[in-house]
Amino acid sequence: MSAGERVVLVVDDDPGIRSQMRWCFDGCTVVEAGDRREALARLRRHEPRVVTLDLGLPPDPGGASEGLATLQEILAAAPGTRVIVITGQEDRSHAVSAIGLGAHDFYQKPLDPDLLRVIVERAFRLDDLERENRRLIEGATVTPLSEIIGASAAIDRVRYMVEKVAPALATTCLLGESGTGKELVARALHRLSPRAEQRFVALNCAAIPDTLLESELFGYEKGAFTGAHQQTPGRIEHAQGGTLFLDEIGDLPSHLQSKLLRFLQERTVERIGARHEIPVDVRVIAATNRDLDCLMAEGSFREDLYYRLCEVIIRIPPLREREGDAGIIARHLLARLATEQRRGLTTLTTDAIDAIDDYPWPGNIRELANRLTRGVIMADGPAITAAELELAPAADRGLPLNLRTVRDGAERHALERALEHGDGNLSRTAELLGISRPTLYALLDKHDLRPARGDPEPRAAGP
């Protein structure tokens, strides 16, 4: 089903009522279900925008327990769904409970097709308005930097560097492990630069055989070699006016390093088989997951090329060094992956979130996306579990969730750092913290950090 298709899921254990309601919603695709299991299966397959739900479902047709449980599972699997609950004349309290659980509206029997049609049509109109509103908000707020997801200090530093470097034309090198998002950062640099309206051309130096890489980079003239049937510009020329991204630059063959160096110095290219040089105006961004210092020490990477490529270096931290970011990125990726796989899953269980935060992610964000894709496909319930991500349960690290405990820990850490930087001098420590000496004395006593008499240094405290 397309995102805008008008699909109504009718959940009722009475086939006669389901048939009557099918004719009620003219112009809509109507899908039917007789119990909770069928309702959830139809929900995942057809992704209805509106659901009508009879609260009196088996095995509790005289009550509302099964209907309310179905409502909760529908909203957990597809939170944006408009659910209209249908109750008997004497079940107003159940309708109020359903609204409290997140139902969009309620309708009391007996069935009036015209009135129910108006309620459903109103739900569709409201859904259309909210979709358009979200589209406008997302279009207004999405920026190149907003695609670099995370809240850690480590990734904040990367965003700061991107903002500072993007407007300049300096050749930039991105250093980081495989899967950390180097191309994403390169694209952000391009979109924030004066060249944003021009091409962004990417070339992976490790993915193309050495025999073809030169022609890919510099292009060739007709007849330059067997199979060269026409004149073909290279990637450098293709990026004219824009940005050339050379990924895995550490794998560039030595015989091409000198030719790339000449281009960076002269800003001209010479196609294979040509006898004239072509001026090219392009910004170069390079990236690698290899240690260029070691490569230079081994003699496999030119030192002069290094200094040309690395006018500015941005180091992209691995996911294990970005505290708290794995869970944030997982939630962001999950929404996209669930849409791609046509599943209604938008949540992770608590054990899955804990396992994601606990795992070291040697494959970084690429590995995280891979496991989430598998989890979306394999999940049986409305949320993905740690087992479905094939992650071991998180070790009990005694994470303090109490705000007072967290605040006290941060306060004590700040005091210890200030005492260290102030060499135990309390006046200097108070100045560093921006507080008065009496306030400092009170905090030192609170955390048992007051220096012992005659001892300029704070005494050792308990763990």
Image (cartoon, rainbow, N blue to C red):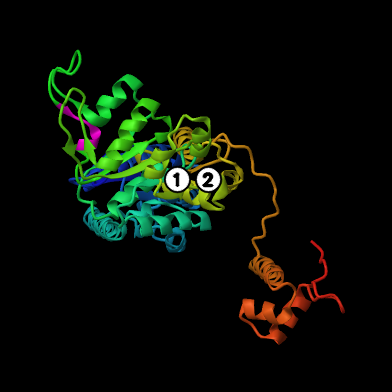
For the point 70% across and 82% down, the residue is 427
Pick the residue in front: 371 or 126.
Answer: 371
The image quadrant that residue 160 belongs to is bottom left
Cα separation, mark 1 vs mark 2, equals 47 Å
The image quadrant that residue 122 belongs to is bottom left
Residue 57 disc label? 1
Whether residue 273 sits left or right of residue 397 in the image: it is left
Pick the residue in front: 48 or 243.
Answer: 243
Looking at the rendered image, the quarter that the N terminus falls into is top left
Residue 459 in the magenta stretch? The answer is no
Looking at the rendered image, the quarter that the C terminus falls into is bottom right
Residue 245, position as x, y percentages in the image = 32, 40
Residue 374, placed above or below residue 331:
above
Residue 236 in the magenta stretch? The answer is yes
For the point 64% across and 44% down, the residue is 394
Which amino acid, mark 2? Leu
Residue 319 disc label? 2
The magenta region covers 232-237
Q: Would residue 380 be seen by someone viewing this image from the given angle?
A: no
